[in-house]
Amino acid sequence: MELAINLIVFLLSAYWCQQGVMVYSFWNKNQPGSGFIPVIFSAILMVFSFFLLLKEIRRMLKNRSQDEHQAAKLSLSDLRALLPVVYTIAAIVLFRFTGVVVSMFLTAFIWLAFISKVRIAKSLVISVILTLTVYLIFVVWLRIPFPRSIFGL
C-alpha cells in the first residue's frame, strides 16, 4: 500500500512539475514566472517520494524471502492509509455545493471528531475557531472573497 501511495505522489509531483514548466512558464523575461514555485515544490516532492519509493522497494525485497510462505491478506488496517485520500476527494466534491467556509468547518470537524478521535465538544470548538480565523484573515482583513456555495454561504 505504501508503495502505491508513494508512486502516486511521485507521478502527481511529476505532473505538477510539467505543468509548471510547460503551461505556467517557469521563467519569463529574466524573472520567475507563475510556474516557478510549483516547479520548485514539485521537484522537492519528487526527490523525497523517490527516496521513499526506493526505501519501500528495498524493504519489500528484504521481506520477500521471509513472507513467501504467507499469503497476502488485505485487512482494514491496510486500507486506513487511503482514508485521507478518499476524505480529501469527498471534501473537494462537497466544496462545490457548500462553499469554502462550510467546507472548511466540516472538514476540520469530521477529521478531528472521527479520524483523530478528539472529543466532539473540543472538535467543535477547534473547528469554529479555525474557520473563524481563516474567514477573518482572508475575507475581512485581506478582502479576498471566498467562493460561495449554491446557497450563498
Image (cartoon, grey):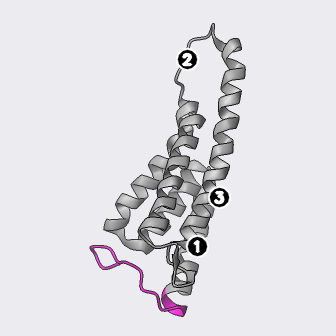
Indicate the secondary structure of the residue bearing disc 3: helix
Residue drawn at x 53%, y 74% is 131
Relative placement, left or right, of 28 versus 117 is left
Q: As rendered, which of 2 and 21 lies closer to the eye?
A: 21
Q: Quadrant of residue 6?
A: top right
Tag 3 or tag 2, which sits nearer the N-term?
Answer: 3
Q: As rendered, which of 106 and 124 lies closer to the eye?
A: 106
* Magenta-highlighted residues: 139-153
Q: Which residue is mark 2?
A: 72
Q: Which residue is mark 3?
A: 44
Tag 1 or tag 3, which sits nearer the N-term?
Answer: 3
Q: Which residue is mark 1?
A: 130
Relative placement, left or right, of 130 versus 51 is left
Residue drawn at x 36%, y 61% is 94
Mark-to-mark CA distance, 3 and 1: 29 Å
Mark 2 or mark 1, whichever is nearer to me? 2
Whether the residues at callouts 3 and 1 have beta carbons within 8 Å, the answer is no
Q: Residue furthest top?
A: 69
Q: Report crowding for label 1: few under 14, some 14 to 19, many 20 or more residues within 10 A (C-alpha).
A: some
Q: Report crowding for label 2: few under 14, some 14 to 19, many 20 or more residues within 10 A (C-alpha).
A: few
Mark 2 or mark 3, whichever is nearer to me? 3
Asked whether residue 140 is drawn in magenta, I would say yes
Residue 121 in sight from this viewpoint: no
Mark linked to residue 104? none
Where is residue 114 shown, x and y percent of the image?
54, 50
Asked whether residue 2 is drawn in magenta, I would say no
- Image vertical order of residue 20 relative to residue 28, above or below: above
The kind of residue on which mark 1 rests is Leu
Where is residue 66 shown, x and y percent of the image?
71, 13
Where is residue 119 shown, x and y percent of the image?
62, 55
Residue drawn at x 45%, y 63% is 19
Indicate the secondary structure of the residue bearing disc 1: helix
